[in-house]
Image (spheres, grey):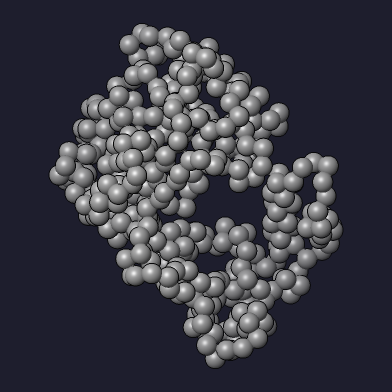
Amino acid sequence: MAKWKLYWVTNDFDRTEDCFVVAKTARSARSVEYSLYGEGFGDIHAEFVREIPDHIVENFDLHYKGYLKNKLNELNKELESERRDLKLNELEENIGKSWSAEMVWPNHADDWIYSLMGVECIYYNGRYSYKYNEEIYSIAAFEEVYGGGSESEKREEVIYSVSDFTSRVQFLNDARSWVYRGQRDAIWNLESGVERYNRKHAFPNGREHEERVLLEQFKLRAIPYLEFNRVPSSDWEWLCVGQHYGLPTRLLDWTKNPLYALFFAVWSSSEDRDGIVYAYHHGREPIDVSSNDDPMSIDRIEIFQPPHLSQRVALQNSIFTAEPVFKDIGEGWQSGSKLKKWFVPADCVKKIRQELEVMGVDESSLFPGLDSICSSIRSKMRI
């Protein structure tokens, strides 16, 4: 009996639709894409990747129902509690059925298959990609397929060197009023630690309630360990200290120095996926914490200028955005603000890291202390 297999399916007429398909034969995998277009079967190609393990097929019902339940939870978070939706009703009905692989496949691969088989979603050289067994499967960028400007304009979101990056920053309007953030994996969402946890797991009593509990617990236990023997004077300062030491908060770290942000995009990167640098223009003055001393009461994103409660905050030119509890999914960055991003290609990470080091931007300069000195020495010795 033929086994189910994972195929990477591409087509010559729209490379933005390249994808993984689960089927028993290459022809069947190609047919999944052909059914969407109705023409060009000869222009569709299927590359065998690997067989679907027996334990996944044998426990298909369990895995697929778990996938449906996750989709249902996601939709429930997006919709108001009193509102129903056809997709919700359909999902609820499907969860009650018994499922086999033959009822769903051949079809496009879903997230649960990626998770069980170790397929990672990444950005690679500015393209949305998948990584499996050290192989990269990339989807062509939309602008590469459909045109729309010069070659440099098509790839304007990708930077290849420090000088390339600084030239982009210099052309930002009112460049000094922008703040910057680097992330070593471009697939990560731009969101605070507490919002990230809430999105994945959902606090049982609501995010704001849990934030207050977390902050109070931290305040009760942190005083003996504070730097400079200075107790924070407001909840804003307490959040800043908690954020510094890894407490999930509504704060998101930024810096006024674009090179520091670029460093964080390439620092400790595995060099097999893109980093990313964001630039954010708030459009308003930082929040006046003397007139609003409760960071949990904000109803829009605010900029918070922290006091120098630690050496690291000062050295990194740190500044924060504070996220409210968003009422609608995807609400995010409000109107009036500006947000730009640049991908740092995986194959340029090492080069950019070396260029920054020559300029004095490295681990020991941004994380002063004996640990960072030793880490820097080890990296230079390739230990």
User: Hey, which residue is sitting farthest left in the picture?
Assistant: 358
Q: Quadrant of the N terminus?
A: bottom right
Q: Is residue 193 above or below residue 19?
A: above
Q: Where is residue 63 shown, x and y percent of the image?
A: 69, 59
Q: Residue at x 27, y 42 (%)?
A: 259
Q: Is residue 155 above or below residue 3?
A: above
Question: Which image quarter: residue 231?
Answer: top left
Q: Is residue 247 visible?
A: yes
Q: Residue furthest bottom?
A: 42
The residue drawn where x is 59% and y is 83% is 30
Residue 140 higher or lower than 305, as above or below:
below
- What is the x, y in percent for residue 346? 33, 58
Q: Nearer the viewer, residue 59 or 304?
A: 304
Place residue 278 in its image quadrant. top left
Q: Residue 48 in the image: x percent, y percent?
A: 51, 79
Residue depicted at 45% across the width and 46% down the height: 339
Q: Nearer the viewer, residue 11 or 283?
A: 283
3 sits left or right of 269 in the view:
right
User: Where residue 222 sits: x, y (%)?
Assistant: 46, 14
How many labels were placed on the picture? 0
- Quadrant location of residue 358? top left
Would you say 296 lies left or right of 313 here? right
Q: Residue at x 69, y 74 (%)?
A: 105
Tell me if I can see residue 132 in this picture.
Answer: no
Q: Which residue is more in the foreground, 224 or 43?
A: 43
